[in-house]
Amino acid sequence: MSSNFAFRGYTRRVARAVVDAMVPRWPEFEADLTDDVLEQVEDFTRNYPPFVRFGVVAMLYGLEFSGPLVLDGLKPTSMLDREAAIARLEKVADHPIPQIRMMVMLPKIMVSFSAYSRPEVETFLGAPRRAWRANRKAFRDRLVQIDARRGADPATPEPLVDAGVRPEDYLRFEPTPA
Amino acid sequence: MATLHDGIVQPHQTRGDLRIDCDVVVVGSGAGGATTAATLAEAGLRVVVLEEGAAYTTAEYSADIPEMLGKLMRGGGSTVMMGRSPVPYLEGRCVGGTTVVNGGMCWRTPEHVLDAWVTERRLGHLSAQRLEPYFELVEQVIDARFQDPGSEGGVNDRFKAGADALGWKLSRNRRNQRHCVGSNDCVTGCPSGAKRSTAETWLPRFYAAGGRLFTHMKVERVLTQRGRATGVAGTLLDPYAKRRFRIEARAVVLSCGAIQTPLLLQKNRLGKPCGHVGRHFTIHPNIKMAARFDTPVDSMRGTHQAWQCVEFKETDGILLAPGAIPLAFMSAVFPSFGPRLAERMRDYRYIATGGILVDDHAEGYVKSVLGLPIIHYDVTDADQAKFVRAAALMAELYFAAGANEVYTPFHHLPIIESPDAIAKLYAHPPRVQDTEYFTAHLMGTCRMSSHPKAGVVDPNGEMWDVAGLYVADAGTMPGTIGVNPQVTIMALARVIAERLADRLGRKVPRAAGEAVTAAA
Ligand SMILES: Cc1cc2nc3c(=O)[nH]c(=O)nc-3n(C[C@H](O)[C@H](O)[C@H](O)COP(=O)(O)OP(=O)(O)OC[C@H]3O[C@@H](n4cnc5c(N)ncnc54)[C@H](O)[C@@H]3O)c2cc1C
Ligand code: SF4
């Protein structure tokens, strides 16, 4: 059951700083993902049970005040510029003490899942999943029709060559350019 | 737009608090629950299934990964067990349970495991010979079959090329699918309708036999009278009104999975005398590896896993396997984030992913403390040594397939740049706390035993301490099995259900062509 959870006030500022440091950026990819991903991370957190939600917020605050842990000054992370915030979080992720590294784990997974499942990122990286899924659905519907025509549903699948489906074509996909 | 089956009852179809009388109430609709419910309903018993999650049609499995994790997984996929290194795990929470989100691999329980259950645990009815017809039936019902030729894809092909080059033995997976077209989205619900989860197999049989499944029903209490289970009660998770339900039955079957069943028992203070509820928790811990190639792998295209390398399985308890996963899941395999991860993911089309599974010797536990679930598991140092060796073998396989870099889940050695660098793994073996694990196989927390002092349920699946209360899910496995568990869970559930039907005065009918003979 989802709640009406939202990052508010200072917590929102902290969450935004962490997301901003963790989202991917590439020179040829113009969109800035921070605000969209922050919203997705909020959605994720909303679906979590209360004690995990508490854990997420605790980890975000842990990262906010992680400066002394990684000998990086006292300034809260949300007051650093982006480059400095990234450098600090990388120090946390590389820390020799596993329990300190753990603070990065859940926020990292939430940000990565959110950012790398965005259609524009998938397409940019060469994985237009939505188009591929539509292609697969249509392709399978065709195979099911072939089965129905042949009255066959072989337990050990054979190439459907006689019906024009060759193994080398099975995964063929030419996405139409966006 | 496809609609849900008539056998499914959703909250908007009922009013107020619910009271139902039936012969058997089954809690959970995953591998264990659906098999049990269908078997009992086909024997002519009045059976009700209660499922905490919602029901979805194939068309509703969307490409939005965060949304699907929220809909299909317990805790939105945030579940983690604690130990020297935290281990993330996933539990399905929807009609069909974890079978909706699993990889579909179908393996029978290995014979040496069944032999040990017979000789060491004295469970004679679980011998390979006695279970043979059950495996056959399960495979038939769920369509366990090989992939269509050509559907494997780059991740599987590279893995096979590496194993072939080294002369290592491969086993072709059977998966519960019909024309799996390699969309590589198994973990968020099959979008093409190919995967044959229990929602597509056992449950339609259950509905056809007159069974009814109620969604959004969270069971919180097991009702008992004089040491005998008489039903269950709980909350209907209706977003518009607080509603309760109470189901009275001649027998209660818990099939909530190896974590939720012991938690429910503990919250109800049941099974305490035996002292085994929630213990003997095994997980087949798993680590992820990846490798970069010079030519595109295109892991988006192809099935999740077409083969497994069994060269080291019997001798060392090590299983190497390819594992195609969607882009977002691949991003979680690498320990970095931000610019470092972006740079790595730029090579997405050239990267193949795989996994390593070891037969574990540790036992964790599942405990309810003040109503909070405490799930604990520690990889042992001996099992970690196996992981290190397995990672070295996997790196060797990938280099033999032509990889130019291999990625590990070890904190201090995330990249192996060349075959010569594999030796670094042995020079500074990574510790448990410096390794990222994952698990999908949760087992053993309500294990079956031949003696009341050795386990939670008897050979019929009935709790030693509570008459009329049965467990039929991954928790009943008497020990770890070393292979993907759904076929084992379904076969054991079928055995339990047949015996229960017998006790309730019914015989399970055999459809034409069905292989099973009655459980002795
Ligand atoms: C990502 C992933 C991949 C996997 N791949 C494979 C594979 O390829 N092959 C294989 O053999 N196995 C695989 N597995 C494992 C396999 O799917 C599970 O072991 C199996 O489904 C467990 O069956 P079960 O009956 O114990 O529980 P589940 O299938 O998890 O079903 C339990 C059900 O009970 C419901 N429930 C729980 N508590 C309550 C309550 N209090 N009230 C009402 N309902 C409740 C849940 O919502 C759920 O639907 C995979 C698992 C995962 C997570
Ligand atoms: S790989 Fe795709 S088509 Fe095949 S079973 Fe998985 S989700 Fe379905």
Image: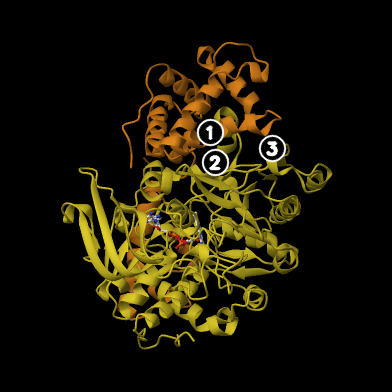
Residue at 47% across / 65% down in the picture?
B473
Q: Where is residue B187 in the image (x, y as percent from the top left)?
A: 45, 53
Q: Where is residue B129 in the image (x, y as percent from the top left)?
A: 58, 85
- Among the 4 quarters of the image, the one containing residue B160: bottom right
Q: Tell me whether circle 2 and circle 1 mark residues in contact (CB < 8 Å).
A: yes
> Which residue, given by chain and number where applicable, does mark 3 sit on?
B411
> Which residue, given by chain and number where applicable, does mark 1 sit on?
A108
What colour denotes chain A?
orange
- The earlier-in-sequence mark between 3 and 2 is 2
> Which residue, given by chain and number where applicable, does mark 2 sit on?
B332
The quadrant of the picture occupied by the N terminus of chain B is bottom left
Q: How many marks?
A: 3
User: Identity of the amino acid at label 3?
Assistant: His
Q: Where is residue B103 in the image (x, y as percent from the top left)?
A: 49, 59
Residue B238 shown left or right of residue B76 in the figure: left
What colour denotes chain B?
yellow
Residue A131 shown left or right of residue B2 in the figure: right
The answer to whether marks 3 and 1 sit on the same chain is no
User: Identity of the amino acid at label 1?
Assistant: Lys
Q: In this view, does B148 lie above or below B508?
A: above
Residue at 51% across / 12% down in the picture?
A79
- Label 3 – label 2 distance at C-alpha: 14 Å
